Image (cartoon, rainbow, N blue to C red):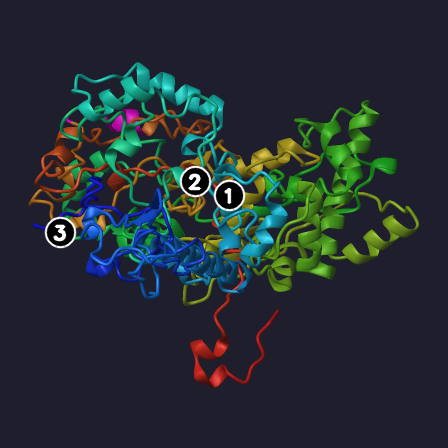
Amino acid sequence: MNRWLQEFSFKKSFYERPNQKWICGRACTGQGCLAGPDARGQCTATAECRPLRKGDRWHCTRPAAMGGPCATGPAPDGACACPIPKCNPVRSLRSWRGLTVLLVLGTCLAGLLFVAGSPRGTQMLSPGKLSFAHASVGSQCSDCHVGVAGRPADWLATVSQTASVRSDSHLCLHCHNVGKAPFQPHSLPPEQLARSTAAAQTNRTAGARPAGLQLAGLIAGSPHPNGTDIACATCHQEHLGTSHDLRQLSNQQCQSCHVRQFAGLAEGHPQFVAYPFERRNRIIFDHQSHIQKHFLDSPQAGLAPHTCVDCHQTDLKGDAMQLKPFAQICGTCHGEQVKGKGAVQAGFAFLSLPHFDDRVLRGAYAIGEWPEDADQPITPFMRVLLSADPVTRAALATLGKTDLTSLPKNDTNLLAAASRLAWGIKGLIYDLGRLGQDELSRRIEGGLGHAITDHQREGSVAFLNAEALHTAFQPAFPHLQTEILAYRQRQIIAKTELVPSPDAPKPGPDKSAAPENWVSNGGWYTTDGSFTLFYRPRGHADRFLSSWMDLTVTDEQAPNPAAVQAVFSLLAAPKAAGYCAKCHSVDDQPARLVNWLGARPDGMIHKFNRFSHSAHLSLINNQGCFTCHPLKVNNATAAYGDAFLPGQHDISVYAGNFQVIDKATCAQCHRPAMVRDDCLLCHNYHVGTFRAVMPNVKMHTPASAVHPGLSSIPESD
C-alpha cells in the first residue's frame, strides 16, 4: 500500500525534507543520500559515511538503513571506502508549487496591466451584456457610471471622487425623464406621497399579508424610510443579458415599501374607489336618456348605434377609448340642427345699429346721418370691437344701461357719451369697409387686450367680405366717408339727419328664399331694412363660433370685461345658434377652456392606473361594454344634467351614468393560474406630469456598419 505521508522512523526515513526547494536526484529510487543538495540545488554528496576514529583505528558509520558498516571499512587515512557519485538534484513539490503560484500571479498582473492600459479595457471588465434598449444606442460605461471615463488606468485619477449608486442615478436622467422628484418613491414630492400614504392607511383590507414580506419587515424593517432617495439601480438591474427587461419587477419588490400589502388582486387588493371616473365628461352626452329614451323613438330607432364600439374606438396604443368623428356618430341626428334648420333664428347678429334719441342729440351732440328705422341693440360682438377705441370704450362705460332712445336732455355727460358712441359706430363701419379683415382683426385684439394667433384670426373674421358689409350699411350712411373724414380731421360734427329706409323691392312672380335660408350652409347675410349683419354657422366645428368662444372664455386681459363676458354668454347659451354648449362643456381647471374634444391620452401625464381596452374587447360576453360598465339602475338623468348647467364649470361636481367598476369583475379572470395579476400589469411606478427627453448619448456604431453605402461619409465628432 502506498503511503503518502513521511515515516519519521530514522531507520525507515532518513531523507525527506519537505521544506527544502531541492531533493536528491536518487530520492525517487529510494537511494537518496544523507546530505542532500544545498540551498542552490548543488549535490553535496561525497561518501556513504564519515568514519569515526576510536583510539588508533577508524570505524565505518554507515547507518543500518543503508546496510550497516561496510565490509572493507575505512581507509588507513580515515577516508570512506564507498564514495557516492554525484547526482542531479531536482526541485521539490513545494518548489514547483511556489513557482506555479508566482507564474500565475505574474500572468494575472500582466493581464490587469494590459486591461488597464487598453482602450477596450472597459469592455473587458464588463460584468455582463447590456439590455437591448441600452446596447442598441452604443452605450459606454461612462454613460451610466461616474468616474469610469477613458481607459481603466485613468480611473485612478478619479479615485478620490465620491462615486456611488446615487451619483450614477443622476446620469440616468440624461436620457430618462421621470418627473420633478425622480429619486423619491413614485417620483412624487414627499408631501404628496405623505397624503397618499395616509389615504392608504385608512383603507386597509382584510387580506392576509404575504409571509415573505412579513419576515422581511421583521428582519430589515422599512427599506426606504420617508424622505430617503431611491437609486435607479434598486429596481432596474443591468448587465443581465440582452433579453432582460429592465422594467420587470416582482410583486414583493413593489409591495416591500407599501403600508398595505396583500397576496394578489383577488386576495387582499382593496376595492376600487370611483374607478375609472376622475372628473365629469368633457363632451356632454347623457347615456341614460339616449339609451333608454331617444334611441327608442321611431324616427331615431333606425339610426341608433347597436353597440358601444359604434361610437367609441381605441387610441393608437389600444388603451383609452375615444369618440369617433361627429359626422359618423352624431351628425345623422344633429347635423342639420347645428346648421340651424328649423330654428327661430338661424344666425347671430354680429353688427347692428341702435336707435338714438335724435330729438336731443343736436348741436354739439349731433350724430350726422343716421337711419330712422334703426332699432336693434348693440350686439356683444360690437361692444368688443368698439372697446378697442379708448374714447368709445369710455362712452360705453358712461352710458352703462342707459336707454339710447330716451336720453335726458339736461344730462350733458350722457349726451356727449351718446354722441361719441354714435360716431364710434360709424367709424367702425367705415374702417371695416376701407381696411377689411385686417381692421377687424386689429379691433378684436384691442377689445380682448391681447394678440391672437393666425388660426384664431382666420376663424374670428370668418371670411367677412366687403359686399356683405356694404349691403347691410350703405343705405344707412350714404355720405359716410365725407362725414368721418370731416369729423376726424377737422372735428366738424355734421348735424343730425335721419335717413329714410329705401323702398322694399316688389315681389316678383317667383318667390325668393329668405336671406338666412339663402345661406343655408352658413355665412354672412343681412335682411332688408334691418341694418344688421348676421352670421349663420356653417355646421359642426364652425371656425367662427369656436374661435370666438375660445377668445372670450376668459376676460382677464380685456379692457372691457363685461363686453367679453357678454359674447361668451351669447354663444354658450343652451339654444344659441350652432348649439355649441349643448355638447361642449366649459372647464375652470386647470385653466378656463372650452372642451372641443373628448378625452385624449396625454403622453405627459402618467397615472398610477392603466388599462388596455383593445386586449379586452374580444373577450367580453354578449353584454358588451356593459360587462364592466353597467348603467346605473336609478334614473340619474337629472343629476347628470345638473353638472353642466350654465355657470357650473367645476369638473369635480358630476353624476355619472355608469356604476363604478367592481374589483370582483376583474378578479374573475385575473387570479393565479388563470391570467396575470401582478402589480405592473395595471400600475405604473413613475407617476406625474413629465415628457420623454431625447437621449443624450452619442452613437458609437460606425456608419458603414449600419449601411455599406455610408462608408464614405465621415463620422461626426
Q: Earlier in the sequence, mark 2 or mark 3?
A: 2
Residue at 13% x, 33% y: name it.
667
Residue 92 covered by magenta stretch? no
State the SS at label 3.
loop
Q: State whether residue 142 is above or below residue 355.
A: below
Give residue 168's mark: 1
**Left or right, residue 220 beside residue 431:** left
Marks 2, 3: nearer the viewer:
2
10 Å neighbourhood of mark 1: few (<14), some, or many (≥20)?
A: some
10 Å neighbourhood of mark 2: few (<14), some, or many (≥20)?
A: some
Residue at 90% x, 47% y: name it.
492
Cα–Cα span, label 2 and label 1: 8 Å
Which residue in the structure is indicated by mark 3?
Answer: 618
Q: Position of residue 587 (x, y in %)?
A: 46, 34
Residue at 30% x, 62% y: name it.
25
Indicate the amino acid at tag 3.
Answer: Ser
Q: What is the span of residues highlighted in magenta in the rendered image?
A: 633-640
Cα–Cα span, label 2 and label 3: 37 Å
Which residue in the structure is indicated by mark 2?
Answer: 232
